[in-house]
Amino acid sequence: MSAVISRLDLGAYEAPRAAALAGVPISTLYDWARKSIVVPSISPSREKLWSYGDLLTLRLVRWLRSDKPEARRTAMAEVRAALDRFSDDLWREVTPGQERPTIAVDAAGQVFHVERSETVGGQRAFRDVLDLFAPFGDGPDLREPDEHLRIVPGRCAGEPHLLGTRLTTRTVAALARRGYELSTIAALYPDEDAAALGEALRFEDKLTHVAA
């Protein structure tokens, strides 16, 4: 069963979680929030909370700001201008099979809105070059982190969970931190595959190290 992603404005992730899932250093996360580059859309003050769509935006900005063989690093001023220009249309509702970023970059590092046949300066744009849902840096796949794990913005507040359940990987990891062995956790959830529970523990362990 594949994850179905449609509402990108859902989910609620605190800073360490958002950084780990997006694959962006937490210092960068705070820096971009402070500079109003990627402002957490769920809660911008006090306890900042980023949405699922914010995770994609964080990945996009990091990618645009990185060196890559097909295009130069995009200036932050151009990144800001693009995010402002596309605003609400950046992560419009998507349907399965159409989960692609709506903006791209050309060889000169200029950012633009992707349309079926759009070219920039007479040069065809790099289309489908970036899948923001796929593993990114140290961040996991944002749809299917593992065989038995899924992330859906409208389910479990966007938290990674076991396929077909509302049992989050965080819950499984919390039990392990309290000293429960995997066999004991499996006994608490007899309907769950032990392999899936093991995936949840490994996933959370990796996220913890990424966020550290």
Image (cartoon, grey):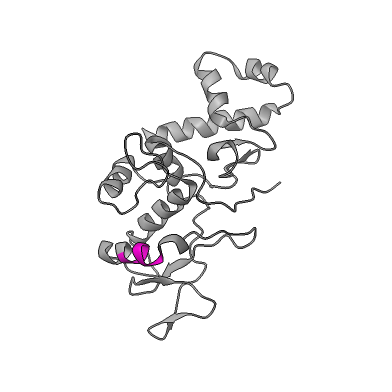
Is residue 131 positioned above or below 24 on the image? Answer: below
Query: What segment is highlighted magenta in the picture?
Result: 81-86
Residue at 59%, 53% in the rendered image: 6
Q: Residue at horizontal 52%, vertical 21%? A: 174
Q: Where is residue 13? Give x, y as percent.
A: 45, 38
Magenta stretch: includes residue 74: no
Identify the residue at image location x=41%, y=33%: 209
Is residue 149 among the parts visible in the rendering? yes
Residue 36 percent location from the top left of the image: 28, 52
Q: Nearer the viewer, residue 107 or 158?
A: 158
- In this view of the protein, which residue sits in the foreground, 136 or 8? 8
In-front residue for pair 96/59: 96
- Left or right for 60, reference 196: left
Residue 126, x across and y down, in percent:
46, 72
Quarter holding the C terminus?
top left
Can residue 73 be seen here? no
Residue 146, located in which quarter of the rendered image?
Answer: top right
- 155 above or below 117? above
